[in-house]
Amino acid sequence: MKYQRIIAAILALSMLFVLSACAQDRDLRAERDPAQTAEPAEQTETPAEPTPEPVEVKMPTATSDDVELYTLDAATGRIVVNVYGQPAASYTLDSVGNIMDKDGRYVVAAENVKEFKAIEKLKFSEPEYAATLAVEEEVSKDDEHVTTYKQTPVNVTLLMSAEVENATNHIIVLEIQDKDIAEIKANANAKILADGAFKINDNQIAVELPENGNARVTVTAKAAGKTSVTALNLSGVLLTSCVLNVENGPTPGNDPESNLSEIIIASDDPMTHAHSYKKTVVPPTPYEKGYTEYVCECGHSYRDDYTAPLPMPTAAPEEHVHVYNSSVVAPTATERGYTLHVCECGDSYKDSFVAPTGK
């Protein structure tokens, strides 16, 4: 027991010595670097910045009909067109089909965009119209009182009926083949539009049909002859055509009633002309569309069956380098021998000729 108490006392003294040494060492380090013994600073969390709320884009409620802007599949892709089917250069389509103006503002939302559609069906009520020019009396003022006569123009009414329910507008283009024989001078319930709004030639006039698509257009026949009247839609597609046959009236001295104006609608007339067209196919080029031209013996013609232009030419392919396989053809008694060289492209030639053996 005595020794045990002595050992316990020695261990206790040793522990006190170690603790005292550690304390002295900590004090020395604090004198050299006070930051090592400083209390750790309290951590303050930086508040997270608030997430901005998404800006809601308010789409317009206007429709294609409201702003008269539509879409059309052209050779260059899908484009925006006006009510006449002509490109609207200040407007574009975004990736989902919304119509936008040049400043990037939405004009028509995709769900309200409408495809441009021209009138697709129209007919004249009769296949041929005929008119006899009226004979007008002229009395001279001299003492002999000589009476003469002259032909005066008469009016022919063209009756049209079109399907307009699905069309973007009710506009057609009437074309008269020969303006020396007849021309459109007046109209009844159809509206003749200013030429400035359309790219049409001197023989054409734009006409807006009424809501029901039925119209009466007056054509003035002014010289004897035969001409055709053709109806086209705004896409240039032929809808229908008819023939106008104009005749000179007889002199009143030969027929007491010939000085009366007369308009004849000749649906059952044996002179009624049925078009018989000769087709000519014009192939496309890289710069022009192809088409088929239809020409009747009466002179009426139109183009249809358009085909897309050919792809633009690319850079010329690399020049072919011939690689020949050679084979020797032995001479015979009557024929020379030679070496035949043939390339995989089909080109060939012969050389190294050998005289016939003569045997």
Image: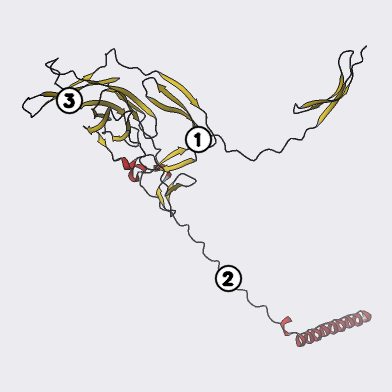
* Front disc: 2 or 1: 1
| Residue 168 placement (x, y as % from top left) | 35, 37
Indicate the quadrant containing the C terminus: top left, top right, bottom left or bottom right. top right
Quarter of the rendering containing residue 117:
top left
Which dot, 3 or 2, sits closer to the camera?
3
Q: Is residue 126 visible?
A: no
Identified by mark 3, the residue type is: Lys
**Quarter of the rendering occupied by the N terminus:** bottom right
For mark 3, what is the residue? 150
Q: Residue at x 29, y 20 (%)?
A: 128
Label 1, on which residue? 288
Give the label, 1 or 3, closer to the camera.
Answer: 3
Helix, strand or loop at label 2? It is: loop
Q: Amino acid at mark 1?
A: Glu
Q: Residues within 10 Å of mark 1 (few under 14, many from 20)?
A: few
Name the residue located 76 percent from the left edge and 27 percent from the top edge.
Answer: 347
Along the line of sight, the residue nearer the viewer: 5 or 255? 255
